[in-house]
């Protein structure tokens, strides 16, 4: 019985894994692009739920300037992830943006943690912490930049 199950799993792996290799990286790039373009555009037009958090974090800049600027920066990151020739630049400008997203964890603990407990993030804290996935995905994409050039 176990041998048949192993054979079935191996057969399915032989079908599925090549498809994941073929489409996975591109889907990852496009997913990041959609997130950055969408969330950035919301900041530009004034409908982002994260605008207040951004304004409170970078309190030394005028939010009327900073939030739309940040939105444009994020849209630019997204556009760079859509087009392979701009991936390096997109990853370069993603790095400071991502670093900035973690500032509230230090500057606004009352906003990102429930009762000051770092093990209990608020919705805002969860929104920030999920950026670890974006950083990791960007690292994977960056590790394949030369592969993408060879296929182009």
Image (tube, rainbow, N blue to C red):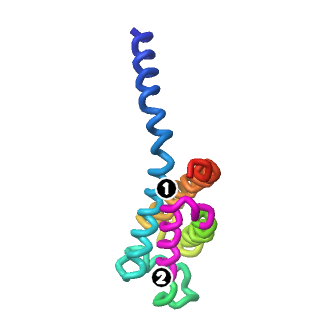
Residue ID for mark 2: 67
Q: Quadrant of residue 61?
A: bottom right
103 is higher (above) or lower (below) than 133: below
SS state under label 1: helix
What's the residue at 53%, 66% (across, down)?
A: 80
- Residue found at the very far front of the displayed protein: 152
62 is higher (above) or lower (below) than 116: below
SS state under label 2: helix
Tell me where residue 75 appears, x and y as whole percent. Answer: 47, 72
6 is higher (above) or lower (below) than 103: above
State which tag comes first along the sequence, 2 or 1.
Answer: 1
Tell me the distance, in whole angstroms, between the alpha carbons under discs 2 and 1: 24 Å
Tell me where residue 5 appears, x and y as whole percent. Answer: 40, 15
What count of labels does the image hold?
A: 2
What's the residue at 45%, 16% (across, down)?
A: 6
Look at discs 2 and 1 and give the one toward the viewer: 1
Tell me where residue 1 appears, x and y as whole percent. Answer: 39, 8
**Considering depth in this image, is 34 or 2 the residue closer to the camera?**
34
Q: Quadrant of residue 34?
A: bottom left
Q: Report whether residue 105 is seen.
A: no
Residue ID for mark 1: 29
**Considering depth in this image, is 49 or 69 the residue closer to the camera?**
69
What is the magenta range? 68-89
């Amino acid at each position: 019985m176990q041998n048949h199950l192993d054979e079935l799993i191996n057969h399915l792996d032989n079908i599925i894994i090549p498809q994941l290799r073929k489409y996975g990286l591109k889907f990852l790039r496009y997913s990041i692009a959609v997130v950055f373009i969408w969330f950035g555009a919301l900041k530009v037009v004034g409908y982002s739920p994260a605008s207040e958090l951004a304004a409170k974090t970078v309190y030394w800049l005028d939010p009327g300037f900073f939030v739309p600027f940040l939105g444009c920066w994020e849209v630019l990151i997204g556009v760079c992830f859509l087009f392979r020739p701009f991936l390096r630049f997109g990853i370069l400008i993603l790095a400071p943006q991502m670093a900035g997203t973690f500032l509230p964890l230090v500057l606004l603990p009352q906003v990102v943690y429930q009762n000051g407990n770092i093990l209990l993030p608020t919705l805002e804290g969860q929104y920030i912490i999920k950026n670890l996935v974006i950083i990791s995905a960007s690292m994977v994409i960056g590790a394949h930049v030369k592969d993408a050039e060879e296929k182009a």
